[in-house]
Amino acid sequence: MKPHARPQPRLSQAGLSLIELMVALLLSGLLLVGLVQIFSASRASYQMAQGLARVQETSRFAIDYLQRDARMAGQFGCVNDQVHIYAGHGMFGELFLSDRTNYTTLPNIANKEALNFDFSIQGFEAKGSSSGDTVDLSAATLPNGTGSDWTPALPASMLALTPAPIKGSDVLALRFLSAESADILSFNLPGETGPNATINVNPTQWPVLKKDLDKGGLFGLADCRQVVVFAANQVSEGATATTLTIAASGVNQSTFDGSDTFAPGQARVYRADSFVYYVGLNDQKLPSLYRARYNVEPGSGAITLAGGASEQLVDGVENLQLLYGQDSVTDAGKAPIGLIESTRRADQLLPAADQRTAWQRVGAMQVGLLVSSSDPAASGQRATSPQSLGVSFKLPNDGRFRTTYETSIALRNRLYGN
């Protein structure tokens, strides 16, 4: 007889109850929410740090460009333009003039303001951007200005820049001779070796005058006694000399004559630079700092923009504010002494009736920039408006990080008497 088989014990099977499942889901959800919050906070912190870094980089580049060119204002050879002007009884030479004693007799052609080398520095104050004013930058696209939006009125040549200057931001024009120069091998007046004046330049030094501008045609011939700014009608590069030919044609309305004498061994040829700094809209319709550079290509007879358009220096510069330090002596009948004791807007310089004298006595400037990050930086709308040289701004609520930077620049060629 077979014994009965003992029944095998059944294993007890148990699952999660609904309550346990809900608790597990709740805990998992809390963990996920925490992870998302940590990721979001880290991302916002990264974007803020990136925005701050980009703004600091932008401001550093913008101020560096402005400082480099502004400090050259008044550079006209071995002495500054003020010395040339006062030594020459209020005048220095420009062959662009039909009457070399009258700076207003420029040729009636487009962009002629670029030839105003009697103004080494010249500013245009944006209306509604004085200390205590608020400039509205909250529009989706900032509007371009008209001439009457600046004081003095912005010339048509500057309004026609590509891109155009925007409202509410100051504009600065700088004109000077380059820091680089070249030796003169010979200087011939008309009739000495041909019908036109010629300047033979050391060919080994000529390349420094082509720096950043291969087909430049504006030059200055200067020693420590006088300076004459002109356009070369022809530039012939050779192995033994580079020859500049200068005639009373094109943008030149006169040429060198017997009154133009220069000290042998001291006179040098410089490139003449004419710049305009302003804020315009880039291809993405975002404000950026631009620099327009004017040129007269040899033989062209026209004043054009180098490269055909303004150069975008740095993006993210939304506003440019400028103040000018003027010499304590503003009387046109007295020489400046180099003591800067007042800071004024472009429309406040003295004497008001003689702006040429007023600008020739500017020896320093203050620069204020409003700079934004190129991308949203998770930055909330500021509770208080940022200020630049006393000007407040109404900002768009687009999440970009914004701040202002200010600096002072000494125009080293204008510190007369120092």
Image (cartoon, rainbow, N blue to C red):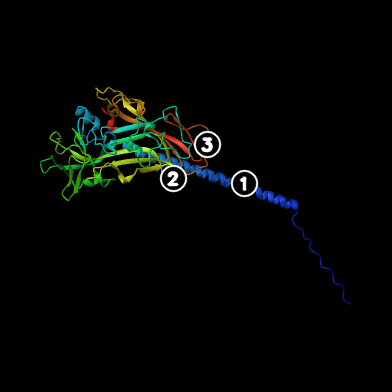
Mark 3 or mark 2, earlier in chain: 2
Kindly report the distance in space between the C-alpha atoms of the residues bearing marks 1 and 3. Answer: 26 Å
Q: How far across and how far down the image is residue 7, in percent?
A: 84, 68
Kindly report the distance in space between the C-alpha atoms of the residues bearing marks 3 and 2. Answer: 22 Å
At 52% across and 42% down in the image, what residue appears? Answer: 378
Q: In which quarter of the image is the N terminus?
A: bottom right
**Element at badge 1?**
helix
Residue type, label 1: Gly
Identify the residue position indicated by label 1 in the image.
34
For residue 381, which numbered disc appears in the image? 3
**Element at badge 2?**
loop
Does the rendering let one see residue 410?
A: no
At 30% across and 44% down in the image, what residue appears? Answer: 306
Kindly report the distance in space between the C-alpha atoms of the residues bearing marks 2 and 1. Answer: 37 Å
Does the rendering let one see residue 235?
A: yes
Q: Which is more foreground, mark 3 or mark 2?
A: 2
Mark 2 or mark 1, earlier in chain: 1
In this view, which residue lies farthest toward the front?
A: 108
Residue type, label 3: Gln
Q: How far across and how far down the image is residue 269, in percent?
A: 20, 40
- Relative to residue 333, is residue 297 depicted above or below? below
Classify residue 158 as left or right of residue 209: right
Q: Which is more foreground, mark 1 or mark 3?
A: 3
Identify the residue position indicated by label 2 in the image.
284
Labels 3 and 2 touching (C-beta < 8 A): no
Classify residue 143 as left or right of residue 10: left
In this view, which residue lies farthest toward the bottom?
A: 1
In this view, which residue lies farthest toward the right?
A: 1
